[in-house]
Every structure is written in structure tokens, then in C-alpha cells.
Image: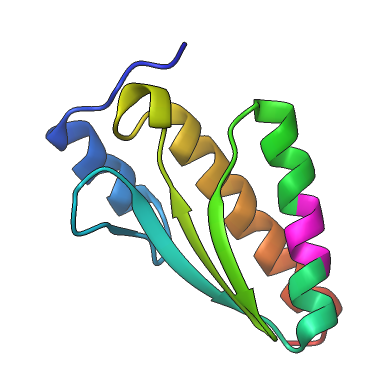
Amino acid sequence: MADRLDDDAIAHMLKSLNGWTRSADGKAIEKTFRFANFSAAFGWMTRAAMKAEQLNHHPEWFNVYNRVEVRLTTHDQDGLTNLDQRLAVAMDKMATETASKQGG
């Protein structure tokens, strides 16, 4: 089980992440990803889902066309853990790879 992060650790984590923000309730990090089209967004979601399954840590997300809004939190800790950071880093890497393949 992952340990819940304190405010200092969360602030440090956010400095290391690209474009993620802390949610209004303080219990999650959030980011909106934009892709070239629906196919790119859905392909990214599929790869992200496989990573989430591997980590046994599943995102809350919402998809419309080329946009995917993501919220990461560790429900059984009622807050943020290193699992959220690991999944955020993986999602960012996959988004960069997707953009490269799409030519942008």
C-alpha cells in the first residue's frame, strides 16, 4: 500500500510534473491533455489504461473528441501518493510519444 503524501511532498511532486495542478479539494492532481484528433486521444487512453492496470492504480478521466481530462488520486488513502506521481509521469511520456507520432 502506498503512503499518503504530505503538503511538502505534494508541492515537490508538482514541481517535477509538467502541467499538473492540485485539485481544489487538495486530494488529487489534474491535467487536461489535448491530441490531434479522437483517434490519437483514444490510443493514448488505451496505453494509459494498460499502465494503470500494471500499477493497479486507475485514473478518473473524461474524454471528448481530442481532449482527455485526468484526475489522479489514491482513493484508499483519501489523497495523493507516489502512485499518482508514477502514473502522471507515465501519462506525460505517452502523450509526448503520441504527439511525436502525430507530427506535433
Residue 68's image quarter? Answer: bottom right
The residue located at (74%, 29%) in the rendering is: 54
Identify the image quadrant of residue 12.
top left
Task: Identify whether 62 is placed above or below 84.
Answer: below
The quarter of the displayed image where residue 79 is located: top left
Q: Is residue 103 left or right of residue 5?
A: right
Mark count: 0
Is residue 104 left or right of 102 when viewed as pictured?
Answer: left
**Residue that appears at 26% across and 27% down:** 5
Dividing the image into 4 quarters, which one contains the C terminus? bottom right
Asked if residue 39 lies left or right of residue 2, the reply is right
**x and y, in percent, of residue 98 in the image:** 77, 70
Q: How is the image coloured?
A: rainbow
**Is 69 rendered above or below residue 92?**
below
**Residue 46 among magenta residues:** yes
Point 29% across, 23% down: residue: 4
Pick the front one: 8 or 32: 32
List x then y, in percent, for residue 80: 33, 34
Left-right relation of 7 to 93? left
Q: Position of residue 8 (x, y in %)?
A: 14, 35
Q: Residue furthest left?
A: 7
Q: Residue 50 in magenta?
A: no
- Please state the horizontal and vertical placement of residue 100, each as a whole percent of the image: 78, 76
Q: Residue at x 50, y 61 (%)?
A: 70
* Direction top: furthest residue: 1
Picture layout, residue 42 above or below residue 37: above
- Range covered by the magenta-colored residues: 43-47
The prevailing secondary structure element of the residues shown in magenta is helix
Between 3 and 104, the one lying in front of the other is: 3
